[in-house]
Image: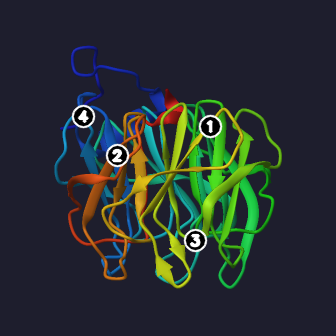
Amino acid sequence: MSSYPTQSSASGIWQLGDIPLFIQDGNWVQLTLGSLGIVAGGLTPAITNTIQFINFASTGNASDFGDLSIAQYNAGTIGNQNRLITGSGQTPAVNNNVIEFRNVASKGTFANFGSLTQTRADPGSLCNNTRGIFMGGTLGPVNTNVMDYITIASASNALDFGDLSGVRGFLGACASPTRGVAGGGGDPSSTNIIEFITIATIGNTTDFGDLTAARYSVSGASSATRGLFGGGLIVPARVNTIDYITIASAGNALDFGDLTQSRTATASTSNSISAVWFGGNTPSIVNTIDYVTIASTGNAADWGDTLSVVNQIEGSSNCHGGLS
């Protein structure tokens, strides 16, 4: 029988609005899962609603976290210490504007959060502890430059934030607590553009610099000070390139090292110490998870494996650089 949480059965930070989700699951899970990297949905090659996670406390294979309410891929994904949120994916070949969420402390099925301002897929996504941003994406045959924002603690529809410098999809994104950065992507040809926003305000992006090469389907991760962009496509070849930037200082990216495989369509996230990339295609779909230490430079090392081969996924964590 379900019951409301009490002081003796729950710890950490939670909100009254979260109680129905825990009751729906039939339990109240204590906040003991730790620092998690989480990825949602994707193609295996079948479309999946599976959510999987790693614990940053040690390397190892991913584990099951729960399910999205609908199977989808190419959805933007953000997270803070309390919530994981996805928005705007493909199901199966149709874009959607659905935003859904789950409390990080409780495994289970996602619930509705609201809607984005546009029906699209594969936006860049980033957040700090308060606000999440969905940047650009694909509308089908064309891309968009629209950026939306949500307040993570308040389930509601997204609002307009401003515009990217051009229409782009399949871009990488990362953040510090104050600044969000987007790099690469397609408009529809590949670009090397890096641009940034101040998360707490609204407005259009400002030029930051350039990636080391124009590439498409790149994935971003960060600490509070350094942003990384890994993998991607320099038509017609997939690459294993990792670039890095100092988030507070506009300028061109520098070479960091290489992923263990040249691949695209990966998910990436971090715990501010390690940046981790999940899955992707080489062009075969893979189950690779690899990582680097953000504060250094060098090639990636093996972390473990995803639950199955998977690509066209997005990831976040409850401990990334935007939350530091």
- Whole-number angstrom distance, CA of label 2 to CA of label 3: 21 Å
Horizontal side of residue 135 vs 294, given as left or right: right
Cα gap from disc 4 to disc 3, whole angstroms? 34 Å
Q: First in sequence: mark 3 or mark 1?
A: 3
| Cα distance between the residues tagged 1 and 2 | 18 Å
Report which residue position mark 1 lands on: 247
Quarter occupied by residue 278: bottom left
Task: Kindly state the secondary structure of the residue where label 1 is placed.
Answer: loop
Q: Amino acid at mark 2?
A: Val
Percent position (x, y) of residue 175?
Answer: 58, 40
Please state which amino acid type lies under the numbered disc 3: Tyr
Residue that numbered label 4 is attached to? 33
**Which three-letter amino acid code belongs to the residue tagged 1?**
Ile
Circle 2: element type: strand
Report the amino acid beneath label 4: Leu
Between discs 2 and 3, the one toward the N terminus: 3
Labels 4 and 3 touching (C-beta < 8 A) = no
For this orientation, the residue located farthest to the top is 7
Coordinates of residue 76 in the picture (x, y in percent): 53, 58
Q: Nearer the viewer, residue 100 or 258?
A: 258
Q: Earlier in the sequence, mark 4 or mark 3?
A: 4
Q: Position of residue 29 (x, y in %)?
A: 24, 33
Q: What's the residue at 55%, 31% (across, down)? A: 225
| Inter-mark Cα distance, 3 to 1 | 21 Å
Q: Secondary structure at mark 3?
A: loop
Please give the residue where the numbered disc 2 appears in the rendered image: 292
Q: Earlier in the sequence, mark 1 or mark 2?
A: 1
Instruction: Tell me the residue that label 3 is attached to.
Output: 216
Pick the front one: 212 or 138: 212
Contact (Cβ within 8 Å) of mark 1 with mark 4: no
Label located before the other in sequence (1 or 4)? 4
